[in-house]
Amino acid sequence: MLRLLLLLAIIAFIVWWFQYIFNPKRKLESALEKKRTFFLDDRNNVRRNFLLTYKGVLFEGEKYLGNTEDKFTVTKISIWSRQPERLHGLTRNDFFEIAEIIAESYPDAEIEWKTPIKEFLHDE
């Protein structure tokens, strides 16, 4: 009986460990902490926002479904920073690179930036 309980405890620990290691939220937090790029998105659920980390800044994007000539797809994305105080040091090229990362997954989408990024990109 003790062996069975020990075996079940080991199996439960292994299952928990795999769930922890492969958890996308943990990967997102790790990328944010290490200032790396990570794109977390459920492509099958248009209603669910995506999260993107870039150079230590967390961005959130809202997807809008629309139609093109031959299909229904995401046609508009509104994106903003969850931590506007961390935008310090980012350049226009960084925002263009973020747009390219998003365009890889949503090529038909028009990207709309929210305040304060919108004002920064439109200032000449």
Image: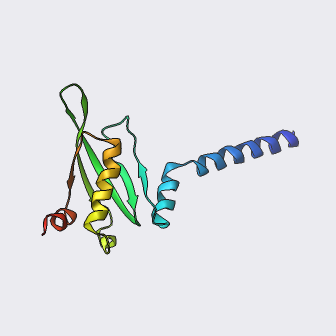
The residue shown at (51%, 61%) is 30
The residue shown at (54%, 49%) is 23
Occupied quadrant, residue 79? bottom left
Q: Position of residue 101 (x, y in %)?
A: 35, 51
Q: Position of residue 92 (x, y in %)?
A: 25, 66
Q: Which quadrant is home to the N terminus?
A: top right
- Between 123 and 44, the residue placed more toward the observer is 123
Q: Is residue 89 left or right of residue 112?
A: right
Q: Position of residue 117 (x, y in %)?
A: 22, 64
Occupied quadrant, residue 44? top left
Picture mark count: 0
What colour scheme does the image use? Answer: rainbow
- Between 71 and 114, the residue placed more toward the observer is 71
Q: Position of residue 21 (x, y in %)?
A: 60, 51
The residue shown at (64%, 46%) is 18
Q: Is residue 90 left or right of residue 27?
A: left
- Between 59 and 69, the residue placed more toward the observer is 69
Residue 47, relative to residue 85: is it above or below?
Answer: above
- Between 69 and 81, the residue placed more toward the observer is 69
